[in-house]
Image (tube, rainbow, N blue to C red):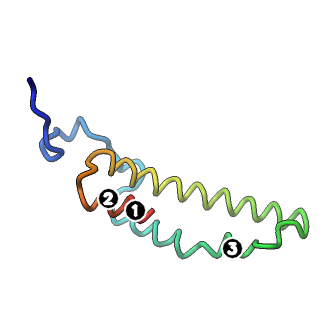
Amino acid sequence: MSTRLQRSEVPIEKTWDLTDLFPSHEAWEKELEAIQSDVSEITQYKGKLVSNATSLLHGLTAYENFQKRLIHVSTYANLRASTDGSDPANQRDAAKV
C-alpha cells in the first residue's frame, strides 16, 4: 500500500502552475482588494438600467467585466484550496472570495 504524500512532498512539476492566473499570491490579494473597491462601478447603475438603452448597455458591460475579474480571483483561490484544503491560508483565501 502506498502512502499519501504531504503537499510539500509533491514534486513541483506535478502541481498546478497558478502563475498563469496570477504571478504571485500578492498580485492575487491586490486584485481582490481592487475588486472590493470597484463595487461602485456596478452599484452606480442600480435603478437606472431601464432608463435608456445606453444605461442598460453600460450597466451590463460593467457587470460582465466585474464578473470576469471575480471569476479570475475565485478560480485562483479555489484551486489553491483544492490542492490542500487543510492549509489554513488556503481556507482563509477561499473564504475571502
Q: Secondary structure at mark 2?
A: helix
Residue 29 disc label:
none
Quote the CA–CA distance across marks 3 and 2.
Answer: 29 Å
Q: Badge 1: few (under 14), some or many (20 or more) residues near its Cα, within 10 Å?
A: few
Cα separation between marks 2 and 1: 6 Å
Q: Residue at x 36, y 62 (%)?
A: 93
Q: In the rendered structure, which amino acid carries the disc numbered 3?
A: Thr
Residue 4 drawn above or below residue 68 = above
**Where 58 falls versus 14 (above or below)?**
below
Q: Residue at x 18, y 45 (%)?
A: 7
| Residue at 33 percent of width and 45 percent of height | 82
1 or 3: tag closer to the N-terminus: 3
In contact (CB < 8 Å): disc 1 and disc 3: no
Q: In the rendered structure, which amino acid carries the disc numbered 1?
A: Ala
Give whichever of 64, 50 is nearer the camera.
50
Quarter placement of the C terminus: bottom left
Camera-side residue: 33 or 94? Answer: 94
- Which residue lies most toward the right here? 52
Residue at mark 3:
43
For image coordinates 83% across by 63% down, the residue present is 56
Judge left or right: residue 3 versus residue 94. Answer: left
- Tags 2 and 1 touching, CB below 8 Å: yes
Q: Which mark is residue 91?
A: 2
Q: Secondary structure at mark 1?
A: helix
- At label 2, the amino acid type is Gln
Give the image location of residue 80, x and y in percent: 33, 50
Residue at the spot of label 1:
95
Is label 3 in a helix, a strand or a loop? Answer: helix
